[in-house]
Image (cartoon, rainbow, N blue to C red):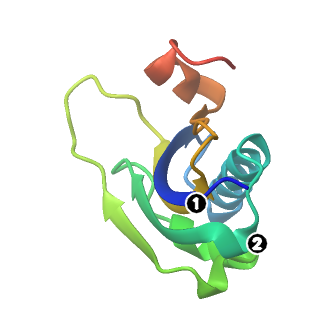
């Protein structure tokens, strides 16, 4: 049996509009894909840090995470640095999770955010 170690998993997605529904839909999708691709259960998640670009201010990404079972996970939201030319309407997340030491993390970039990490498989 392999031992567990703490890993950081990155992810990002874009949102079509600044509305609680659009943000919620994409955040929930992103979290589910991260969990699926990394074969994780919610109880292995230690914490999550979300950032959002300044053009997304109608909802906290953490609210959507709580709606899909992350209520016991420490969550925090922050504003993304407003770098000129950066991707707009983007939500990023860094999840900390316990994973088998033999398993590599699979980072997830969805929708237009795929272009942020085109070195990763879709």
Depth order, front residue of 3/117:
3
Above or below, 87 against 24 in this view is above
Determine the residue located farthest toward the top in the rendered image. Answer: 119
Above or below, 103 against 121 in this view is below
**119 lies left or right of 3:** left
Horizontal and vertical percent position of residue 87: 40, 29
Please report whichever mark, 1 or 2, sits nearer to the chain's N-terminal start: 1
Residue name at image x 50 percent, y 58 percent: 5
Tell me the element at label 1. Answer: strand
Residue identified by numbered label 2: 68
Horizontal and vertical percent position of residue 84: 20, 27
Horizontal and vertical percent position of residue 15: 60, 42
* Quadrant where the image shows the N terminus: bottom right
Residue identified by numbered label 1: 4
Mark 1 vs mark 2: give the one in front: 1
Depth order, front residue of 26/49:
49
Residue name at image x 55 percent, y 52 percent: 18
């Amino acid at each position: 049996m392999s031992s567990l170690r703490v890993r950081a998993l990155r992810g990002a997605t874009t949102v079509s509009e600044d509305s609680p529904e659009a943000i919620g839909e994409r955040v929930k999708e992103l979290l589910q894909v991260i969990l699926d691709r990394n074969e994780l259960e919610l109880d292995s998640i230690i914490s999550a840090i979300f950032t959002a670009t300044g053009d997304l201010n109608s909802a906290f990404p953490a609210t959507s995470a709580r709606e899909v079972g992350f209520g016991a996970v420490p969550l925090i939201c922050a504003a993304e640095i407003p770098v000129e030319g950066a991707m707009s309407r983007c939500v990023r997340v860094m999840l900390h999770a316990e994973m088998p030491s033999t398993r590599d993390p699979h980072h997830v970039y969805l929708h237009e955010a795929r272009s942020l990490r085109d070195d990763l498989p879709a």
